[in-house]
Amino acid sequence: MAELTVKIYSDALKRTVAFDMFIPNELNADAQYASRPMKTLFLLHGYNCPASNWVPQYLCEKYKFAVVIPNGNNSFWVDGSATGHNYGTYLCEELVNFLRRTFHLAMTPDDTYIMGFSMGGFGAIHSALMYSDTFGKAAAMSSALIIHKIAHMKVGDTDDVANYAYYYAIFGDLEKVEESDNNPENIAKWLIGEGSPIPELYMCCGTEDFLIENNRQFHEYLDLINFPHKYIESPGNHDNFFWDEYTVKFIDMMMK
């Protein structure tokens, strides 16, 4: 397994940024996957979490896929209003195009997947829907689908995670956020209505997770508009034990 740290200048973020890559030895791939093009999986970390690789090496080698790990800070992986905060553009355009030019990876949606937990789960869903012509599959674990929760917050309001000023900087006008492109429901409905490419979407949440109702609500909305997806609930909390379990399960589903 080759491990690389790559530094590039991002015009979207107005600074030099670094991301990590893990590229498996193709000789270790299972015979049935060895001859196909190498796939690429983007990993999105959660709020206040470091960018790290939580995918077991044996899976990368078995299914022959590279892992790309950008740092999204606490951006929710969307474009913010402030200069240098276009994290969605950085991830889904700049970084993808750099990998294509430089490593000949992520060339087609069939070979380009995205996975995240918590804030990164929101980012995986939002990115795959906004850029459905880039990402063919997405896996979202314990996703922070908080748009309805933060809608209509006022100056001075705060919750257990952050305050009004933070959410406004990330998502824009909170009086209008439910109708904006930062609400994954709107993008999903648009994709269905336009007949646009629809990524394979895998979602899970633990029944003891504080975000369970948010995930159920989104799952029910997708059912309502007949958006194809796989949603799983099982006992678990908002922690690495749950995410490690479903990382293996979802990679098996996506890569086979």
Image (cartoon, helix red, strand yellow):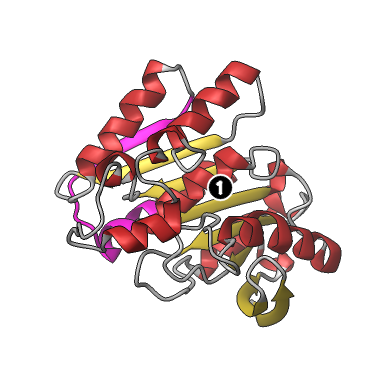
Horizontal and vertical percent position of residue 226: 45, 17
Residue 18 at x, y percent in the picture: 62, 79
Q: If the image is split into quadrants, where does the C terminus sit?
A: top right
Q: Residue at x 57, y 61 (%)?
A: 87
Quadrant containing the N terminus is bottom right
**Rendered residue at 42%/76% (across/down):** 50
The residue sitting at the right extreme is 101
Q: How many circles with numbers are drawn on the protein?
A: 1
Most extreme residue toward the left is 208
Instruction: Read off the magenta span.
Output: 228-246
Closer-to-camera residue (64/178): 178
**Tag 1's secondary structure?**
helix
Return the x and y of residue 130 as percentages of the image width and height. Answer: 59, 40
**In this rendering, does residue 117 appear at all?**
no
Percent coordinates x, y for residue 90 in the rendering = 65, 62
State whether residue 147 is above or below residue 171: above
Name the residue: 60% across, 57% down: 41
Q: Quadrant of residue 190?
A: top right
Q: Residue furthest front?
A: 155
Query: In the image shown, does 15 or 108 lie closer to the viewer?
Result: 15
249, above or below 22, in the image: above
Residue visible at 28% across and 47% down in the picture = 150
Could you tell whether 127 is left or right of 241 in the image?
right
Q: Quadrant of residue 218?
A: top left
Report if residue 155 is visible in the image.
yes
Residue denoted by label 1: 127
Q: Is residue 214 above or below residue 189?
A: below
User: Would residue 217 be counted in the magenta stretch?
Assistant: no
| Mark 1 surroundings: few (<14), some (14-19) or many (≥20) residues within 10 A | many
Q: Report whether 44 appears left or right of 5.
A: left
Which three-letter amino acid code belongs to the residue tagged 1? Ser
Asked whether, in this view, residue 222 is left or right of residue 66, the answer is left
